[in-house]
C-alpha cells in the first residue's frame, strides 16, 4: 500500500489479492482524505469487493454505480434465497441498461429526481406493471440510501413511487369454472395428447395444493413425495423453492394421489413431474387462445388465481385460517386473509348460522 506525493496532490495505489486499486486526491493539504480512501479500499478488497473509484471530483472520489451494486448485494447473497438473487440481478440489469448504457450515467451523484422519473417512465413504457416498477425502484433506492448513510452521497433524490391500484388478485374460480377449464384442456389442439394430460394434471395440482404456479408447482419433483411421522404420503416443498425460504408440507388429496401414482407407476422416484410442460407454448397458449376467449375473461383471470381459489375454498369449508396460512406458506396471516375471498356460499352459511343461533336462543328462553 502506497500514498505518494505528486506535483498537485496525493497518488494512491493499493494491491490486495492480486487486485490493483488506484486513485488520486488533489491538493497536498488533503493527505488525511487520501489516507481514508486507502484504508476504505483495503477494507473493501479484503471483503472481496472490487472498488472502482478512479475519478476525482471536488477533491473527493466519486462512487460508481457498479461499486454501489457490488457493495450492496454481491457479497451478501449467501444468506438469501436463490429466487431473491435472480430478482436482484434482474433489477440491477434494468438499472444498468437505463442509467449506464442508455443515459450514460456512471456515478451515483449524477442520479437525481429527474433521472429517476425518466427511469420510471421507461419501465412503464416497456410494459412493466406498477408493482414491478416499484420493485425495481426499490433496488435503486436501497443502493442510494446505503451510500447516503455511509457518507458517499449528500442526499437521496426524491422518488415518486408508482401507485399500485390493487396489490392482490381478487379472482377465484368456482368448482364449475374449474371443471370447465379441465374440459377445455382436452379440447386444445396440442401436438401430442400427452400435453393435454399434463395441462389437466397441472390444473389439479394447483387447485389441490395452492402452490405458486411457476416457482413451485412447475418445479414439482417426485422426490418431494415423502412420508410424514404418521406414515402418510405428503409433498414436502424444499426451502430453496419457497418464496419465504421455509420448508412446508402439503397433504395429498385423492385425485392428486392418482396423478402422482401415474407418474411413479414405473418405479420412478425422482424427476420433474411437469418437465415437458412449457410455460409459453403450452400453458400461456392454452390460457390466452382458448380459456380467456371462451370465458370472456380479462387480466384478472390468470393461472395464479388457482392459489386464491385454494385458500378461498378452504375458508368456505370452515378451515381455520392458521391452517390455511401454513398450507399456503405465508409468513404473515394478513396476507392469507387477502387470498381468502368471501363466497356466496360462505355468506349464506353465515346467515343460516345467524338464524339458527337466534332460534336456538329463543327456544331456550321458552323452555
Image: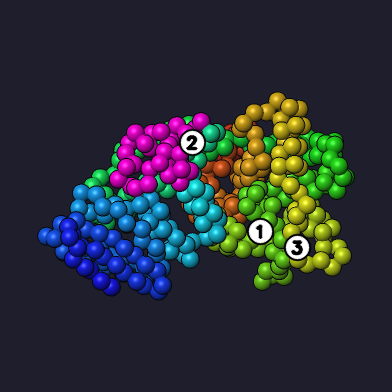
Q: Quadrant of residue 52?
A: bottom left
Q: Position of residue 290 (x, y in %)?
A: 77, 32
Kindly give the residue lying farthest to the left in the view shown: 29
Q: Residues within 10 Å of mark 2 (few under 14, many from 20)?
A: many
Q: Position of residue 337 (x, y in %)?
A: 52, 44
Kindly check if marks 2 and 3 are in contact, taking CB atoms under 8 A apart as contact: no
Q: Position of residue 111 (x, y in %)?
A: 34, 41
**Residue in view at x 71 percent, y 39 percent:** 284
Residue beneath label 2, please? 123
Tell me which label, 2 or 3, sits earlier in the chain. 2
- Could you say which disc has been placed on residue 271 in the image? 3
Residue 98 lies in the magenta stretch: yes
Kindly check if marks 2 and 1 are in contact, taking CB atoms under 8 A apart as contact: no
Tell me which label, 3 or 1, sits earlier in the chain. 1
Residue beneath label 1, please? 250
**Residue in view at x 68 percent, y 28 percent:** 297
Q: Indicate left or right for 17 with 168 as reference.
A: left
Q: Residues within 10 Å of mark 1 (few under 14, many from 20)?
A: some
The correct choice, above or below, for 90 with respect to 300 in the image is: below
Q: CA distance from mark 2 to mark 3?
A: 38 Å
Residue depth check, mark 2 versus mark 3: number of the one nearer the observer: 2
> Range of the magenta residues?
96-125
Residue 125 shows up from this direction: yes
Amino acid at each position: 500500500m502506497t500514498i505518494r506525493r505528486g506535483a498537485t496532490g496525493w497518488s494512491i495505489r493499493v494491491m490486495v489479492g492480486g487486485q490493483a486499486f488506484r486513485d488520486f486526491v488533489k491538493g497536498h493539504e488533503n493527505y488525511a482524505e487520501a489516507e481514508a480512501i486507502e484504508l476504505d479500499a483495503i477494507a473493501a478488497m479484503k471483503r472481496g469487493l472490487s472498488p472502482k473509484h478512479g475519478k476525482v471530483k471536488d477533491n473527493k472520489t466519486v462512487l460508481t454505480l457498479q461499486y454501489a451494486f457490488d457493495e450492496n448485494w454481491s457479497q451478501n447473497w449467501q444468506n438469501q434465497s436463490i429466487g431473491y438473487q435472480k430478482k436482484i440481478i434482474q433489477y440491477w440489469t434494468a438499472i444498468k441498461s437505463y442509467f449506464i448504457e442508455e443515459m450514460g450515467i456512471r456515478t451515483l451523484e449524477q442520479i437525481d429526481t429527474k433521472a429517476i422519473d425518466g427511469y420510471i417512465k421507461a419501465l412503464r413504457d416497456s410494459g412493466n406493471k406498477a408493482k414491478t416498477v416499484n420493485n425495481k425502484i426499490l433496488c435503486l433506492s436501497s443502493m442510494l440510501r446505503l451510500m447516503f448513510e455511509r457518507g458517499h452521497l449528500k442526499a437521496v433524490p426524491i422518488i415518486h413511487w408508482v401507485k399500485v391500484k390493487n396489490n392482490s388478485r381478487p379472482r377465484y374460480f368456482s368448482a364449475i369454472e374449474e371443471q370447465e377449464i379441465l374440459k377445455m384442456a382436452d379440447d386444445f389442439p396440442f401436438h401430442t395428447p400427452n400435453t393435454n394430460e399434463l395441462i389437466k394434471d397441472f390444473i389439479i395440482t394447483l387447485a389441490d395444493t395452492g402452490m405458486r404456479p411457476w416457482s413451485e408447482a412447475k418445479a414439482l419433483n417426485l422426490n418431494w413425495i415423502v412420508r410424514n411421522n404418521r406414515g402418510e404420503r405428503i409433498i414436502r416443498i424444499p426451502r430453496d423453492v419457497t418464496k419465504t425460504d421455509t420448508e412446508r408440507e402439503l397433504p395429498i388429496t385423492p385425485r392428486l394421489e392418482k396423478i402422482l401414482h401415474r407418474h411413479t407407476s414405473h418405479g420412478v422416484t425422482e424427476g420433474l413431474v411437469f418437465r415437458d410442460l412449457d410455460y409459453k407454448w403450452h400453458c400461456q397458449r392454452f390460457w390466452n387462445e382458448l380459456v380467456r376467449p371462451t370465458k370472456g375473461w380479462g387480466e384478472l383471470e390468470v393461472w395464479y388465481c388457482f392459489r386464491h381459489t385454494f385458500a378461498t375454498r378452504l375458508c368456505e369449508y370452515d378451515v381455520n385460517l392458521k391452517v390455511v396460512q401454513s398450507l399456503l406458506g405465508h409468513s404473515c396471516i394478513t396476507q392469507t386473509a387477502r387470498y381468502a375471498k368471501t363466497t356466496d356460499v360462505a355468506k349464506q352459511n353465515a346467515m343460516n348460522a345467524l338464524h339458527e343461533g337466534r332460534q336456538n336462543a329463543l327456544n331456550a328462553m321458552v323452555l
